[in-house]
Amino acid sequence: METVEINSLSLKRPHAEDDVANADETKRQKTSEKSKTGNDSGQSVETVTEQPDKSLLEDMKNEIIPHEEGEEPEDEELEDSDEDGDPESFADMMKHGLTESDVGITKFVSSHKGFSGILKERYSDFVVHEIGKDGRVSHLDDFSVPVDDEDPSEETFTVLSDEDKQRLEELQLLKNKETSVAIEVVEDTKEKRTVIHQAVKSLFPGLETKTEDRDGKKYIIAYHAAGKKALANPRKHSWPKSRGSYCHFVLYKENKDTMDAINVLSKFLRVKPNIFSYMGTKDKRAITVQEIAVLRITAQRLAHLNKCLMNFKLGNFSYKNHPLKLGELQGNHFTVVLRNITGTDDQIEQAMHSLREIGFINYYGMQRFGTTAVPTYQIGRAILQNNWNEVMDLILKPRPGAEKGYLVKCREEWAKTKDPAAALKKLPVKRCVEGQLLRGLLKYGMKNIISAFGIIPRNNRLMYIHSYQSYVWNNMVSKRIEEYGLRAVPGDLTLKGATAVHIEEGDVDNYTIHDVVMPLPGFDVIYPKHKIGEAYKEMLVADNLDINNMRHKIRDYSLSGAYRKIIIRPQNVSWEVVAYDDPRIPLFTTDLDKLEGKPLPVLPTDGKFRALKMEFSLPPSTYATMAIREVLKMDTSIKNQTQLNTTWLR
């Protein structure tokens, strides 16, 4: 259950990114996509007539749902591509997308009048700080490296030539038939040989070195000490016993999701991504700060990456004896700016007081269900029905709506020929879901769709059925609030420890709506004893599923179920309305700004625009989008936001 994923509709507004006033931020962004504007949560009051840039479509047309917290992502992640379809007809295409009501999101808990505002006009308007299991909020505030006599000298990072590094990497990754690499010692001294030995061993885990004389010259010979296993298991004997095996650090990232960041770090460090661990995945279109742990990589090596990576900063290093585990965080603290707000001061006060005192409905957000005309919950439902032809058809058939050009061609070829090889040739990126399934069909044949589907990484397969569970839960919660309002009633469920029990008539006064949970359907949960319990059964019967038999003949797809609070009350809620004239300027300082000594821009007392700065903390498995939806009273779906901005999109 994703904690902070919140993909906004990103509308391009005139930022003048190359303007001098924005030069510093532009420098930090130059290896990433350009900053895009967002209107995830409210109608823009300004009409813009520019065409969307390609990167805007990239955020919206991704069908893969984010990683679940508490589940380990596969080593092999599905890839995306930078190639896009034609953005010209995007507004028309998005008419086929989902709205909130399509996935059961229909109710609000507050009585205030809604207002509009622009969410994520800049990705730096959305900042997430992870809250660890000890309640400590992660901040990047220290670049210093722990002093350790065992660390190699700074010369270690520069003594090898680019050519040497290339040859060593190929040897390390077993990319050629060479069994060793010889590096000539040009300035032959014992000190120089020692530095080269250290450089090879520290920069290329799995390699050992020795010194040899050849034709009167000294060479450092690098070779594999333990064959293929050496890369996955960094050398134990080279790590000081007094130092914890894991280097923990704070990762500050801009406009990158967590797995992308780890893949980049592993590439630069020349190690496998699975030696990194973390407590939760974080959103891409945001600035996020979280703790990461890595096995037997020194703080010195990690700190060196700060000199060569854009959009990342690493700091707050420490050595510990344990990795991090998914799901063991307490939650996340959000700092959000809603720009160009239209609400009166009274409306804003009412909205924020309601968020603090009552909270919001704990719906699964729109990103849980995909953005195309084939919602991910439909594929999940077909899996649970054991209808594999339908699963294949839903993933591969042509569909209206916003899609990348190469996917459209692939689907057309599939519809015409039903030939996996021919359809696969239309895909420049073979590791998207469609490419993985086609590769499976090519390998196992059209009569073994189950095995073909199994080629898709496990997390991505499971997200389809989790999407269906979320779809059912959203619909049932809306029915529950429609039927019984915001009070606990007999027959509701509450948790006693980890066990769900029914609220009895005589005890109902001891509970509030904040104690009530509802189940995600599965074989190991109980259901409410009032009308909503029957509504669960009716919904699943309509989908040709038996609520009393949620075990699947394939164990991976058996749903045990879970319980989820229906109302979440954010903690540490604060807010401030500020005026501003320039939409390009930041309205608060980030951790990196503070480390670099950047002052906060002086804001006018009576500017052209108003913004709502809000802060709040949420537990894991909770969508920040839904909290902001409650404040603005706006549909957060891409389809609705696109329709609100059709003038711009023409």
Image: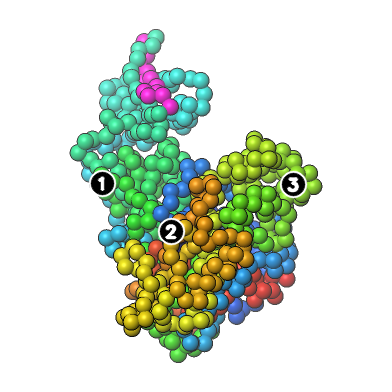
For residue 79, side relative to residue 360 (left or right):
right
Mark 3 lies on a secondary structure that is helix
Height in image: 408 above or below 586? above
Mark 1 lies on a secondary structure that is strand
Is 225 contained in the magenta span?
yes
Mark 2 lies on a secondary structure that is loop
Q: Could you tell which of marks 3 and 1 lies nearer the N-terminus?
A: 1
Name of the residue lying farthest toward the top: 215
Height in image: 312 above or below 455? below
The residue type indicated by label 2 comes to Asp
Question: What is the x, y in percent for residue 36?
Answer: 57, 64
Q: CA distance from mark 1 to mark 2?
A: 37 Å
Query: Looking at the image, which residue is at 74% across and 41% down?
Result: 419
Q: Dot 3, crowdedness within 10 Å: few (<14), some or many (≥20)?
A: many
Q: According to the image, label 3 marks what residue? A: 414
**Front one among 135 and 124:** 135
**Front one among 111 and 491:** 491
Q: From the image, state whether disc 3 or disc 1 is nearer to you.
A: 3
Secondary structure mainly formed by the magenta segment: strand
Q: Quadrant of residue 472?
A: bottom right
Q: According to the image, label 1 marks what residue? A: 320
Question: What is the x, y in percent for residue 318?
Answer: 27, 49
Name of the residue lying farthest toward the left: 242
**Front one among 391 and 369:** 391
Which of the labelled discs sits on residue 524, or is there none? 2
Q: Could you tell which of marks 1 and 2 lies nearer the N-terminus?
A: 1
Question: What is the x, y in percent for residue 499?
Answer: 34, 64
Q: Could you tell which of marks 3 and 2 lies nearer the N-terminus?
A: 3
Q: From the image, state whether disc 1 or disc 2 is nearer to you.
A: 2
Q: Which residues are magenta?
A: 216-228
Height in image: 381 above or below 8? above
